[in-house]
Image: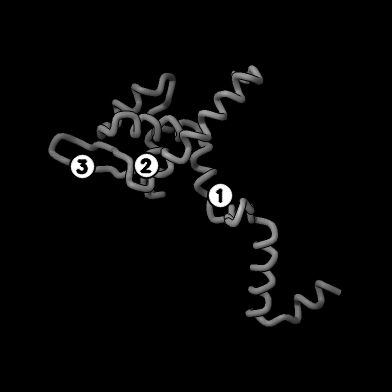
Amino acid sequence: MMIVEIMHMNNEDKERERTRKRNDICMIRTGNETICVDPSLPLFSQIGKKYTMLILAILEHDGIKKNFNEILRSIPHSSSTIISKRLKELENMGLLIRVESDEGVVYSLTRNGKKIMDSLIPFLKISEKISLDLNCT
């Protein structure tokens, strides 16, 4: 019966139904605030990729712009291909900026990249503690 009803809905009604269902499944409610997880999924996916967190941490560490080789050397056993790919992905997401000058190309975090790192620090601290408690390292 429900499938038949949805098939007969106009586009506006279908969109309202999709929004209602999305609101039911993607929300985190905390205190007086409701947060939708869905728009953040691409960012979470990127952060979870190999070397992404390390690249963000390297660029955040002292606030000094880094060139590709400095980033590559800071991540032992990393591949230049993957580091290059991650840098491009992070640039496309607006988390870092690539600046070309006479002295070469350097990378630094954008304002949003810094906000992400600032918000990840508490998460990383508790994750480290839990991992050590569980002997996950």
Position above or below: 79 against 32 = above
Mark pair 3, 2: CA separation? 20 Å
Using a 10 Å C-alpha cutoff, classify the residue at mark 2 as few (fewer than 14 neighbours), some (14 to 19) or many (20 or more): some
Residue 114 is labelled as 2
Q: Which of the image's four quarters has the C terminus?
A: top right
Question: Where residue 101 sits in the image (x, y, percent)?
Answer: 16, 41
Q: Quadrant of residue 52?
A: top left
Q: Earlier in the sequence, mark 3 or mark 2?
A: 3
Q: Which residue is mark 1?
A: 41
Amino acid type indicated by mark 3: Glu
Residue at the far right: name it: 1
Secondary structure of the residue carrying tag 3 is strand
Residue under the image location 29 percent in, 38 percent down: 107
Q: Which residue is mark 3?
A: 100
Amino acid under disc 2: Lys
Q: Earlier in the sequence, mark 1 or mark 2?
A: 1
Q: Position of residue 83 (x, y in %)?
A: 40, 32
Name the residue at 34% across, 43% down: 96
